[in-house]
Amino acid sequence: MQGYTEIGGTVLGRLINLLLQQFGYRLSKIDRGAPNHLQDLLSELDLGLKPLVLDVGANTGQTIDAVRSVYPDARVHSFEPDPDLSLLLDDKYTHEVGIDIHPIALSNSIGKARFYRNVRSDLNSLFQLRASSVGRFGRAKDVINVQTLTGDDFLETAGIDDIGLLKVDVQGAELQVFEGFSSAIDQGRFAWIVVEVSFDGPYVEAQSFNQLQALLSNRYQMYTAFGLTYNKSYALNQCDLVYKRIKDTNAHSA
């Protein structure tokens, strides 16, 4: 999600801007493209030659592209409940071996759920936007029903055991995804986890960071964070947290 501005610039730059503003000018940084923090992170992780990656909240394939740029032979299971986006992904990766698109939402139960589609597809969510967030975070396009499945059920059905990376970006429903992976988390079946967390999110319902941390802390330790964004008071709004599996000789293949 890109609802807030990432802090940048220097003290010198701000001082120069103050001076230039006296003459009606403003100094601006040339945008050379948004940094791909996930791709940079993947370059530093040793996931093996053919890692298995779960991409929960695929959107238009950003994570798939980042993973394949670093690990060309990675096996990727991507989950995207928006039917328009899942069709786009099917078409985009139809000739790519080892990429599977699943048109479902991973959550903490099996069944159906309301899915709020936004005019900005990266803000689609199982949760509704707060009234105060409309405009700044797009607006509702429509509401559809989508199929839901728990991650543990998916892993059992697919016969998947150890996973190199679990990436979760589902706009406020991260806790529900992890609750659905509770067995896999307890067994430490993910080597690494990357999850987008909002501390002051735009949705009516959203996960509590403390709940999320409590669910992961027995088997995972926080490793780093990237993509930090702040509000005007410099309070942290959102970031991507990276968790590393805690090695335990008594646990599942850790």
Image: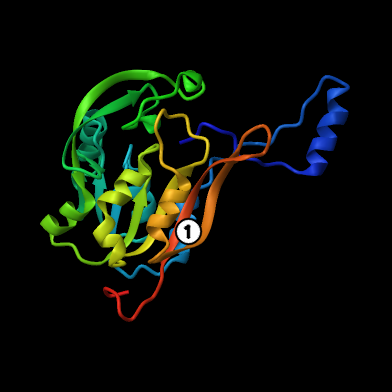
Q: Residue furthest left?
A: 157
Q: Is residue 56 visible?
A: no
Q: Is residue 66 above or below residue 172?
A: below
| Residue 64 image point, x, y percent | 32, 49
Q: Which residue shows up at 47% across the image and 47% down it?
A: 209
Q: Which residue shows up at 33% across the image and 81% down it?
A: 249
Q: Is residue 22 visible?
A: yes
Left or right: residue 195 versus residue 11 is: left
Viewer-proximal residue among 167 and 127? 127
Residue assigned mark 1: 41
| Residue 20 image point, x, y percent | 85, 27
Viewer-proximal residue among 158 and 156? 156
Viewer-proximal residue among 20 and 167? 167
| Residue 163 image point, x, y percent | 28, 63
Q: Which residue shows up at 41% across the image and 19% down it?
A: 139
| Residue 156 image point, x, y percent | 14, 58
Identify the element where label 1 is drawn.
helix
Q: Residue furthest bottom?
A: 249
